[in-house]
Image (cartoon, grey):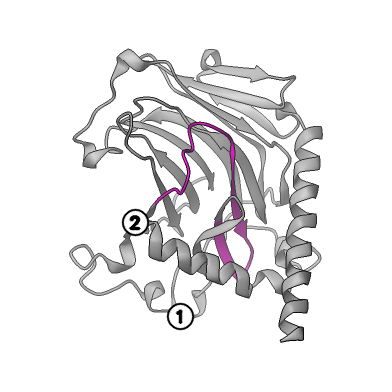
Amino acid sequence: MSSLIFIFLVVLVLHVVLAREIRRNEEIISFDQNYKVTWGDNHVMSINQGKEIQLTMDYSSGSGFASKITYGSGLFHMRIKVPGRDSAGVVTAYYLNSQGNSHDELDFEFLGNREGKPYTLQTNVYANGEGNREQRINLWFDPTTDFHDYKILWNPHQIVFYVDNIPIRVYKNNSNIGVGYPTKSMQIIASLWNGDWATDGGQTKINWTYAPFKANFQGFDVSGCQSQSLNIDQNCVSNSYWWNDKQYWQLDLIAQKQYENVKQKYMNYDYCKDRQRYPIAPLECLH
């Protein structure tokens, strides 16, 4: 019992130290150091000397930004506050994406809803051009009233999506049995756009009288291995990067319990369990 308590305390201290380091860097790094506006220039506002960026969308355009370089592994994070009030049909996205055909992609997509109804947070994983791995959860808070932390851990062993440091999705590297796993350099991207499909299966459309819709972003430091080639540099799988260390190859006991709780209480769709769509479960769902 005493050894378990010791392990718990060590893990807790590591999480606290890491969170403090990330928050300290957030206060130092401004948007222009690592990111650039990619579309909708006149719908992007810099706040607090570049420590915060506001994307807006109206009937004429949405907007977006992206990292200046691409990465091959890391712990990528952003603090986000999504549009409030009636946001049906509005999608706020934060994701990693590779270039070219047969792309890799790791998605956070916030699917708006009618006022008073909850947002849905959808995640997806593309590997070698194959996606359709959607999972959706209802958040345990209102993401429109304040900033929350959204993170993606990507290393050679697993991909973990986090909300406020709680794991909500784990995608393991099962390439040894033929399951696709991202191996291409990816850019960090954020956008606010018209997603007609996003609410009630596309039945509920955007109410433009509530425009402009606004999403705010903070935390522009990047903990990632720079990789400029199409496929990730082999240096990016090295254990010299802390996020590739053995302790990040799988969830610890505390995180595993948090993950199981999210799946039990908040998940409302999992492609692995959709037998209409997949009469035979995809291979990765069996491991």
Where are the magenta residues, as a range? 138-161
Q: Position of residue 280 (x, y in %)?
A: 24, 75
Viewer-closest of 96 and 257 = 257
Image: 135 above or below 41: below
Relative to 235, 152 lies left or right: left
Please report the residue visible at 31 percent of the width from the left and 16 percent of the height from the top.
Answer: 208
Q: Position of residue 142 (x, y in %)?
A: 46, 38
Please report the residue visible at 48 percent of the width from the left and 44 percent of the height from the top.
Answer: 141
Q: Residue furthest front?
A: 1
Frontmost of labels 1 and 2 is 2
Look at label 1 and name its amino acid.
Answer: Ile
Please report the residue visible at 43 percent of the width from the left and 43 percent of the height from the top.
Answer: 109
Relative to 207, 148 lies left or right: right
Please report the residue visible at 48 percent of the width from the left and 46 percent of the height from the top.
Answer: 108
Q: Quadrant of the N terminus?
A: bottom right
Q: Quadrant of residue 249?
A: bottom right
Residue that carries the numbered disc 1 in the rendered image: 177
Q: How many numbered callouts? A: 2
Viewer-closest of 153 and 163 = 163
Look at label 2 and name its amino acid.
Answer: Asn
Residue that carries the numbered disc 2 in the rendered image: 132
Image: 8 above or below 210: below
Relative to 281, 16 lies left or right: right
Q: Quadrant of the C terminus?
A: bottom left
Image: 129 above or below 195: below
Answer yes or no: is residue 251 visible.
Answer: no
- Reply yes or no: does residue 143 show up in magenta: yes
Q: Position of residue 78 (x, y in %)?
A: 62, 41
Pick whichever of labels 1 and 2 is earlier in the sequence: 2
Viewer-closest of 70 and 19 = 19
Q: Residues within 10 Å of mark 1 (few under 14, many from 20)?
A: few
